[in-house]
Amino acid sequence: MKYLLFILCFYNIQCDITYIEVKYPLAGKRSPPNAIWPHPQKIDISNDLLYIHPNDLKVYSNIENCDIITKAIERYKPIFFPPTLDMHHPPSDTDNILQNLTLNIKGNSQCEKYIELNSNEAYNLTISQKIALVEANSVWGLLRGLETVSQLVYINEQNYVVINSSVHIIDSPRFRHRGVMLDSARHFLPVSIIKKNLDVMSYNKFNVFHWHLVDDQSFPFESKTFPNLSRAGAFSRDHVYTPADVADIIEHARLLGIRVIPEIDTPGHTHSWSKSMPELITVCWSHGKPYQAIYSVQGEMEIFNPSEPRVYSTMDALLREMKERFPSNYIHLGMDEVYDKCWLSNPSIRQWMVDNNILSTKSLHKYYADRILDITRNLSVTPIVWQDVWDEKVELPPGTIIQVWKDSSDNIEFASWASYLNRAANEGYNVILSSPWYLNYINYGKYNTDASVMNLEFFKYYEVEPLRQFSGSNEAKQRILGGEACLWGEFVDGTNLLSRFWPKAAAVAERLWSPAHINNSEDAQFRLDVHRCRLLRRGIPAQPILNGYCGNYELGMAKSMINHPAFNYDNAVWNDKTVQSSSQSGKVLASLSSSSSRMFSYNVYSILLLFIGYFYYK
Amino acid sequence: MKYLLFILCFYNIQCDITYIEVKYPLAGKRSPPNAIWPHPQKIDISNDLLYIHPNDLKVYSNIENCDIITKAIERYKPIFFPPTLDMHHPPSDTDNILQNLTLNIKGNSQCEKYIELNSNEAYNLTISQKIALVEANSVWGLLRGLETVSQLVYINEQNYVVINSSVHIIDSPRFRHRGVMLDSARHFLPVSIIKKNLDVMSYNKFNVFHWHLVDDQSFPFESKTFPNLSRAGAFSRDHVYTPADVADIIEHARLLGIRVIPEIDTPGHTHSWSKSMPELITVCWSHGKPYQAIYSVQGEMEIFNPSEPRVYSTMDALLREMKERFPSNYIHLGMDEVYDKCWLSNPSIRQWMVDNNILSTKSLHKYYADRILDITRNLSVTPIVWQDVWDEKVELPPGTIIQVWKDSSDNIEFASWASYLNRAANEGYNVILSSPWYLNYINYGKYNTDASVMNLEFFKYYEVEPLRQFSGSNEAKQRILGGEACLWGEFVDGTNLLSRFWPKAAAVAERLWSPAHINNSEDAQFRLDVHRCRLLRRGIPAQPILNGYCGNYELGMAKSMINHPAFNYDNAVWNDKTVQSSSQSGKVLASLSSSSSRMFSYNVYSILLLFIGYFYYK
């Protein structure tokens, strides 16, 4: 009885199927407009539909005073009933109408504040007898179930809001850690974009936002303890995440069931620290001179100086602040790509190494890592490190998470990320996988009229099997916590983050949530295409992955996007076409005056902001 | 005396230099905020600056009643004085103020209506004695000069509007045909996006919009003669370019000095025609049966049937309509990628070939091409064809333009596009180059901390030298008309066109406009980075090419982009947080009602539209 939806479209109410027209028909099954992404563990769906009354759908719950749930319902209201689309009331001669949506928590569970690594995200969704019921052991399961309900709802061609009348879904995630990493240092990412990206993550059941906060290029994170770090190290005084911004992002993520894990990458990637704390950073030497930047090899100052005691007192205070401000209780310590040649170039560091019997830069890196890991141990936060530090044989405290991002290494023998995962998990480490999911790489492969290779990228990300080389105990398997889709920021900022990342990152979302056997990428591309259209409908400019279109609302969206005053201010100041006469070499065609224009355009903004503010804060 | 601008920044008025912070310093010179793109032929710039009074800059011209000029001045007003930025009046104690901008046409030239292939786009720009003077032989030169003036103007860190006090620029394009090709068939491109893209083209001195209107996937072009083509062949009845839309786009382009060349691609790429005119399309056979689609090889109907007389009468009427509606008097006929196996699979076509002594599909293609070229000859329009047809030895009428898009061919011997250009030009054909400029391909190469390879794509497009293998007469050289940056639509629609295409396409713009010796890509990347920030300031979401940032306005832009009601309607309908009590299995948390929300959000729209309308139509 699974997936009769496609047949259904010719049966009861006509479906609003995404139209895909390609020269050479694609292999695989087309997907119905309510195909679910990521695919649930088990799903049975009837061949009948119910209407939903856009003015009269009650939502019940047995859990009271729980902001996670009340805010979720508010959030999903415009997703169920998009204000930009026309919707009809159900026909008067039918009682095939969904009566209510109930979100019930099982047993004695209570509202929770923050999702955790081991939170239970399972849920059951049943639609029967004109009632939709989501049941879960935790509010997080209810959130995931509500997202699934929202994906089942669609607006058909006759503008009725409909949902299947008989549904039974049993669902839970395959992996616990399903993350997205953004880099706000190569380019500053506006808070609004980060929050919008969190929304899209929740539409894909991601549960971790790994925030690569700072790097060589800039230090946008405003520390309360060391405010000079961002004052000097950010691109400008406005390219900064204030404490209020960070709290806003954490709160936004909290309500979506997403943990925020900050990364303070050291000892490398710390050039931006040198603007305010040069005493912590190694001076690179060359040809007997200090402060020598060499193009494409080193900056004049690079990486922490492990011989400097203030490095550790500073890190202790900063990590203490991170622990206080980021409730996830995880801190990513970076520790990747240590440029040891700068250490070796510096005479005083060389002398200090000799004095302390540290005979290689690997040992020096280990010395540094040990001291920082001591700090996190004392703070009782769980450290996450890029794999480099384990590759260099640093002994990591129990519970440390290793993030695997390479496919080979000079320092440790492994054939691929898959064998690395296997080995680390079997040696007792928790691991998360990113090697195949660096979504900043873009490779479509060669252009080819064979449509199956055109969206190569999707296939590449989707067909990853994290456990493909795993062999070991069930306990060891549990230590493969999941993975992260990473978007490094060299070519990404507010202009293109959302369209570049989505819907590609959704491939990773399904791989980490859905059962391993949901891996037919030929079919999945159509379901993802439907999901992409869903993202568009929700206001996310996710780029296309197949030829075709998403329905007429895409037209309006593009139009309003381009007509926005911020993107088209020439419209807003089009108020002076007067042609004056003149005595000079010709006619004065216009006075290029802007003051009155500006006044008017500010008025537009004020009124718009006033209205948005009204709805937002009310 | 060239390019003292960088020194200047520490001299007179502090410059608002784009900040670029990279781990390893990039090679090459940083660029000042008023660096010009594409680079002029000759430029001398002083080391002093003038203020510009944002309320009092007069514009003069000796050309009267010319909409090209009056509309350009209106267009540039908000570009000189961006309404979203604060600007100060010049200090009261200075008279270093630009007095006026004069746009003068030389000799007896008059206002023209449409730019043509051989229009004169040269201009001289002089700033001296507090007066900026653009002189040109045609209004098109004045347009190009006005764009250059607008790039010299910037707003410094103290919020003064400034320009160099002594400038002498002599400028003209290297190539006559500097085009952008967009594909509106794989995905529909909203009119507003096409028009916005025309704006960006004008900022880069492009002068041809090659519009790949229709293809297998859809037929969005609404023909007056054959309205059923789009009625049946478009993605939906709204995914259509009406006659008014097309006229709107042509008019928009006309005012920017851009020719619009439509492409009706035949005999291949015509699957969408089969929806309304199946009689024109070849039925593909397989295993003795008609209408056989074979995955990734053929559709059930493919390519025109050259044995069908109605093909030629239809094309005659349609091309006649195209000539009437597109004033450029050029029509691109496509003629690429003819899938001859479908022809051969069809018994009646095989019989017809025998009957007519046409003994190969190449000859059949030639037969078709000859008849279509006869039509264009009779209509006196200049045909453009993709190179395939010449590769197949079809004799082309004099004046035909061959668009080179391959780097090798089975049908004609050539080592590379460069030798192809050389040969075609020497054999008397006009040619335009696209092979190295398919900007839908995305290849960054391997990620590398060496910043110089990170923006590989830019280098790849920029370092093309169209004449690198040319040897022949000056007359033959003139037949290499220019080139086009092509953006095929498989993965492009309104969500990502502007951010994906820009600023990459600007690399092609400079190659086609600037002298050949302006080819230092290490330097050019910084100038392009400045230009990218300029595009952002003008409301174009051009993606980043280097690390860093563009000033604070980028923050506001991203914020307003994401807060736009069309992209964030959940804010606009956030007006019902009431929690009601209930008697069912728990509490009613909310009624998912949308009607009142919609009313409110329409109010936001109404007021916004009212204001935009007010400025637009005033």
Image (cartoon, coloured by chain):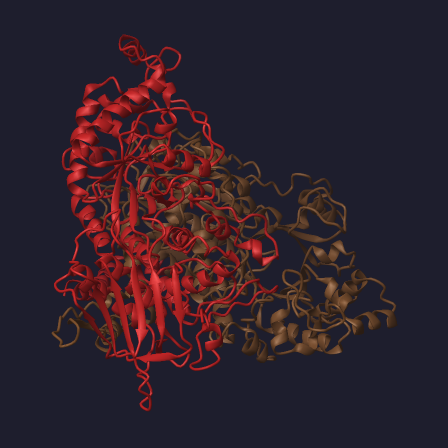
Chain colours: A red, B brown
**Residue B146: in sight, yes or no?**
no
Identity of the residue furthest to the front in this view: A473
Residue at 43% across, 82% down: A12
User: Residue B452 appears at what percent x and percent y?
Assistant: 46, 33
Q: Nearer the viewer, residue A102 or B229?
A: A102
**Residue A79: in sight, yes or no?**
yes
Q: Nearer the viewer, residue B209 or A387?
A: A387
User: Residue B250 appears at what percent x and percent y?
Assistant: 51, 67
Identity of the residue furthest to the bottom in this view: A93
Q: Nearer the viewer, residue A296 or A572?
A: A296
Quarter holding the C terminus of chain A is bottom left
Residue at 22% across, 60% down: A602
Residue at 88% across, 68% down: B357
Decide: is B549 above or below A515.
above
Quarter holding the N terminus of chain A is bottom left
On screen, residue B496 versus residue B575, left or right, reads right
User: Residue B610 appears at what percent x and percent y?
Assistant: 28, 72
Count of marks, rendered view: 0
User: Residue B217 appears at what percent x and percent y?
Assistant: 57, 67
Decide: is B21 above or below B491.
above
Place residue A586 in its image quadrant. bottom left
Decide: is A503 above or below B276.
above
Place residue B373 in its image quadrant. bottom right
